[in-house]
Amino acid sequence: MERLVMGQVVAPKSLRSVVAFNPMDEKSAGISGKKVSAVASLIAVASVSTGAEAQQSNLPPVTVDAPVQRPRPAASKPSPEQVRARNAVRRAAQRQQAQQSAPTTPSGPADANPYADPAAPYKVDRVQASGKFPEPLLNTPKTITVLTKEILEDKNATTLREIGRSTAGVTLGSGEGGNAFGDRFFIRGFDVRNDVFIDGIRDPAVSIRENFFTEQLEILRGPASSFAGRGTAGGAINIVTKQATDRNFQNAETTFGTDMTKRVTIDVNQVVDPTFSVRVGGLFQDANVAGRNFVTDNRWGTFISTKYTPTNDIKITTNYVHTDLSGYPDFGVPYYKQGNVPATEAGIPRGTWYGFLNRDFQTARQDFGTLTGEYKPTNNITLTSRTRMEQSTLEYIGTLPQSPITTNPDPTKWTITASAQSRNQWVDVIANQEEAAFKFNTGSVKHTAVTGLDVSNERIGIGRYTGLSSEAFGAGFNSSGALTLQNMYSPGYTNTPGPFNPVLGGDPTRYNVDSGAVYVMDTANWEDTIIVNGGVRWDSYKLKSSIAAASSSVDSDFVNYNAGIVYKPVPIGSLYAAYATSTNPFGSELDATGTDYGSSPPTGTTILGPEQNKGAEVGTKWELFDRHLLVTGALFQTTKDNARETVGTTLTSGAAYRIQGIDIEASGKLTDRWSIFGGIVLMDSKVTKSNIPGNVGLPLANVAHQSFSLLTKYKFDGDWELGGQAVFRSKVYGGTFGANTGTLIPSYWRFDAFIEKKIDKNWTMKFYAQNLTNKLYYDTLYRSATPFVAVAPGRAFYIVTSAKF
């Protein structure tokens, strides 16, 4: 008879013995849930239908057919679409987990870099220019180094110059042609000082740039005129500014350190309503420079950004930035030619400064505003319009330690000539970019095509100060007002009271540049296995220059292109090859005042043809350690034809250069606790053709041919982080183009370290040590036969306190 056991109906023993089975056997045999339910129903019906009379009767046997195992379908390889979908779901889950558990403060996700991997802030997934570079970095056939704001913070890189000082493959150059203090960089052997962009729009002001408004910094390596326009022989630098977001946060940071350093920054975002948000930031800094006497580095600035999204298809953003940097200018130290080293390597004190405290000054101001409108008429079409207005000024009066006399074996008896140098440069820019991006399919190939129009007007004025010879009273001054035979070891004129009455002179050198460009590009992706991209760009460059009654003009049109192919044998890796061209029109280095620096002459001098650059690159990229570490490696070669050089006193063209090398980089996380960012770049360069026979075969000047940098940090229990940075740069030769002066600055290793503690969910403190060993090293070398050398900062310590709400 049936029995009730724990609320269940139990069949008679005879029936149970017939139909008993092992659930594991059922599973292995493939019995479906429906069959199991049917058997259970049969037991229940049979048990109830017997009634009380059937308690002593024998039930007929019940036969249950053994289950037949059904053949399993053959395993099929997931399609590329399924792989992409699966990876997208996995990355979304990781992103959500990172936002919930990884942030050190509640505002962590709110102010996160929109281009970076949220679980690995050292790793960037995409660059800002999504139209020209629609694929992730893994799928982009070009070496692009990206420094996120987290990297900038851990490097303590508050200026663009510090980034150049501590990044492999980038060499600092002295601002020449009269602009001794503008940001000047060499990438893959070529000058890119006029190839700096802000949010994708060229910034021709060779200024001194702060980073407090920077979201990330992108370094494109190799010729890139089809992407960026004129120049870009070695690459380009794009500064990505902070933009208003859809979440509220309030961030503040204070820094106190050695050399009287005081620095405060704020960054606040407020969502006013669901369609409008605003972000504002500010900077104040009062500091000296480690290892240099009297030199100051004072800064202040502000930015404001807004975002308005009246509909899902329309977005309007604005961005305005103001920076003001001031201090005493520093022309560094003289060069000791007999020993072929800077004078500070031969006994001159490291901190020796050669300026006039009561005369010298430097200011660099920059204002720029950008209006961007984006409209999506369909999901596959995006129309973008950007308009930029900018005004920049760079002014200084400084003292150059020239003509060193070092024949006496006693360095305390060496002398220099203290020569006045001055500049008053202003740059006005108005630019507009119109771009249309289209997404469409041709069979199984997905396309992202973009076409655009760039127009801009750049007006530059370069003046000098007069009256600098007003101090030329008494003995020791020459006819130009330079102070001769001054003690190099300890200059005695530093506190000279004056009088000093500098006046801005008339008849500045003026440049007016009208440029326009049309470009088209396409990226074709076949099942995320083969990706091909290519583009072509036509540029028009019209330059007029004048000084007093003399004038000249350059009218140049040129076409450049790029092509690349990527093969992905597995989703996490890619192999690629790429080729690109670029053009340097005559007179395009607008901060210069001499033709041998790249400027256009304001007289009847012959206008030379443009320089032509070609670059080839093959490489591979891999996302390792759960795709949180991007590792790249590339072999590259860049050539320049019709290069300009000075023969005697005449500027000519027809020279040629070649530079080739290997570039290996890594950025991201090795583990959940260990992050790294760095690389190694090894290059070989040669002058392959010259109108001066002795130049052929020389390496290029102003370039560190071997460089290495590694930033790393490790997170310990208790919310402690320990990190540091190692930087190596090989020796750098002096010279204009080829290393033809016999001068050089030595190689160096530099080490930094920091320790960071998260106090609570809102507060963090970091102790940072820069140049731990107090290494005496040098940023730049002036190219001439009587050069000066810029001394890099010495050891410094900082305490940084961050608050995020």
Image (spheres, grey):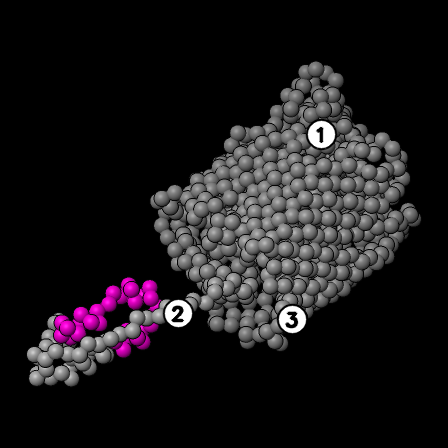
Occupied quadrant, residue 68: bottom left
Query: Marks 3 and 1: in contact by CB < 8 Å?
Result: no
Mark 2 vs mark 1, CA separation in Å? 79 Å
Among numbered discs 3 and 2, the one appearing first in the sequence:
2
> Is 107 included in the stretch rendered in magenta?
no
**Residue that label 2 marks:** 70
The CA distance from mark 3 to mark 2 is: 37 Å
Q: Earlier in the sequence, mark 2 or mark 1?
A: 2
Which residue is disc 1 drawn over? 744
Front: mark 1 or 3: 3
- Return the residue nearer the eye: 458 or 613: 613
| Circle 1: residue type | Leu
Q: Nearer the viewer, mark 2 or mark 1?
A: 2
Q: Nearer the viewer, residue 649 or 38?
A: 38
Q: Quadrant of residue 177?
A: top right
Residue 626: horizontal and vertical position, in percent? 48, 52
CA gap, disc 1 to disc 3? 58 Å
Which callout, 1 or 3, points at the residue further toward the start of the chain?
3
Side of 719 where 690 appears, left or right: right
**Where, quadrant-wise, is the N terminus in this rendering?**
bottom left
**What span is in magenta?**
10-39
